[in-house]
């Protein structure tokens, strides 16, 4: 009740190393609750900047010319490859680690800051499309680990006909 099911699931995935023993730490679970809040805030920031207006889920990355947008698209592809490799090997801890570092470190800490000045320039439409795509990809990749918050965000961020659980895994 204190931290939520998603934070507990994410903590379990983080500690699920092969042959390891799960030692629950409430501080770690609290940290993953904060991670969910960070994702929520990134989606809220996107909403305040018109990212979701007229948005439809794209299966391919948008065309990007701005350096920040090209960078985050590349980082998203790298993270997808890492997560796929980890899941193929049943290394849920490695998949969780890649997602945590990507969403918190690259998307929320860096890309959101890089995108702020782009919203007022000639690359505004490209940046909105890129941010929407990156956040969509983040929600899809996080869904097996944090199904409740990602499903809620999926429904709130754009007019969608399907639930996230029924959406395709990225390629």
Image (cartoon, rainbow, N blue to C red):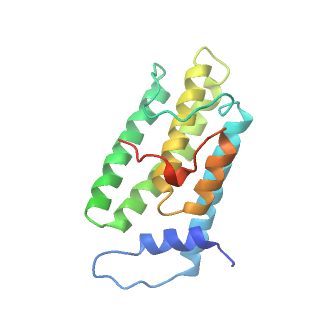
Residue 36 in percent (x, y) is at: 61, 59
Whether residue 90 is situated above or below residue 104 in the rendered picture: below
Whether residue 106 is situated above or below residue 68 in the rendered picture: below
Residue 34 in percent (x, y) is at: 63, 63
Quadrant of residue 21 within the rendered picture: bottom left
Image-based side of 112 in relation to 76, left or right:
right
* Labels in figure, total: 0
Image-based side of 119 in relation to 13, left or right:
right
Residue depicted at x 63% and y 17%:
121
Residue depicted at x 40% and y 43%:
170
Q: Is residue 128 visible?
A: yes
Whether residue 5 is situated above or below residue 24 in the rendered picture: above
Residue depicted at x 30% and y 59%:
86
Q: Residue furthest top?
A: 122
Image-based side of 85 in relation to 158, left or right:
left
Q: Residue furthest left?
A: 89
Quick one: quadrant of the N terminus?
Answer: bottom right
Residue depicted at x 49% and y 21%:
66
Q: Residue furthest right?
A: 48
Q: Nearer the viewer, residue 135 or 169?
A: 169
Image-based side of 169 in relation to 156, left or right:
left
Residue 87 in percent (x, y) is at: 32, 60
Residue 83 in percent (x, y) is at: 35, 54
Q: Is residue 104 visible?
A: no
Q: Nearer the viewer, residue 6 or 124?
A: 6
Whether residue 104 is situated above or below residue 24 in the rendered picture: above
Quadrant of residue 8 within the rendered picture: bottom right
Quick one: quadrant of the C terminus?
Answer: top left
């Amino acid at each position: 009740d204190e931290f939520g099911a998603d934070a507990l699931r994410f903590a379990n995935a983080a500690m699920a190393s092969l042959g390891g023993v799960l030692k629950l730490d409430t501080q770690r679970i609290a940290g993953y609750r904060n991670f969910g809040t960070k994702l929520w805030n990134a989606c809220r920031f996107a909403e305040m900047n018109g990212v979701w207006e007229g948005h439809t889920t794209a299966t391919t990355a948008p065309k990007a010319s701005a350096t920040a947008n090209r960078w985050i698209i590349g980082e998203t592809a790298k993270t997808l490859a890492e997560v796929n490799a980890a899941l193929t090997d049943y290394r849920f801890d490695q998949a969780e680690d890649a997602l945590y570092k990507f969403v918190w470190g690259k998307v929320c800490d860096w890309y959101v800051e890089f995108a702020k000045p782009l919203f007022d320039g000639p690359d505004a439409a490209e940046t909105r499309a890129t941010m929407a795509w990156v956040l969509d990809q983040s929600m899809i990749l996080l869904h097996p680990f944090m199904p409740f918050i990602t499903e809620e965000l999926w429904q709130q961020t754009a007019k969608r006909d399907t639930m996230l659980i029924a959406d395709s895994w990225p390629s």
